[in-house]
Image (cartoon, rainbow, N blue to C red):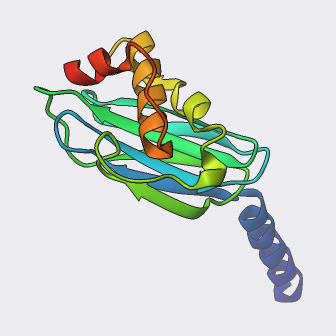
Amino acid sequence: MLARVLPITLLLALLCAATSQAATLKVPVPAEGQVAVVVAKVPKKAKAKLVRAPAAVAVSGAARRGRLAIAVTRPRGTFGAGSVVVKVRAGKARGVRRFTAAATSGTAPRAACKTLGALLGRPLQTGSVAAGDLALVGGAVAARLCGKPAPGAAAGVLARL
């Protein structure tokens, strides 16, 4: 009896481990008026899903074509502590780079700059920021990290954070 149960149990354990290939990324909540960004390489068909975030922060980002970008924005006058948890389905994240104050410092990898603005412009949780403003913040932060000029209205949106 034990000879039959043991191989079946081992097979089920291996099957569960193989099907649950998902990575969890934690992004720390930035200081007031700042934006924290995470950039990583993921498999081509990976998808990002927001699992947990404080109510006051705004989260934007996506995974597409082998690249993951997540931005966490904390407006001035809001309370939020801890971290934002994002689950990456269909694989693990490699080469994770974190920028805790992306609005003022940091340089993104050159390979990420091609799609960074489009990825950071997709809102996952708006918090107290309008979805249109959140897309502008994502484009402005992407331009700042890649060393390019910010879009026209982005300076006003970043000043209101």
Query: Which residue of the protein is positioned furthest toward the left in this rendering?
Result: 77
Is residue 63 visible in the rendered image? The answer is yes
| Percent position of residue 97, x then y | 48, 59
Give above or below for 6 relative to 161: below
Query: Is residue 152 left or right of 39 when viewed as pictured?
Result: left
In front here: 155 or 124? 155
Which residue occupies the foreground of this view, 156 or 30? 156
Where residue 35 sits: x, y (%)? 32, 39
| Left or right position of 40 against 71 | right
Horizontal and vertical percent for residue 12?
79, 68
Q: Which image quarter holds the N terminus?
A: bottom right
Quadrant showing the C terminus: top left
Rendered position, 78 above or below 153? below
Asked if one can make out residue 52 in the rendered structure from this viewpoint, the answer is no
* Residue 111 x, y percent position in the rendering: 66, 52
Which residue is located at x 56 percent, y 56 percent?
A: 109
Q: Residue at x 89, y 81 (%)?
A: 4
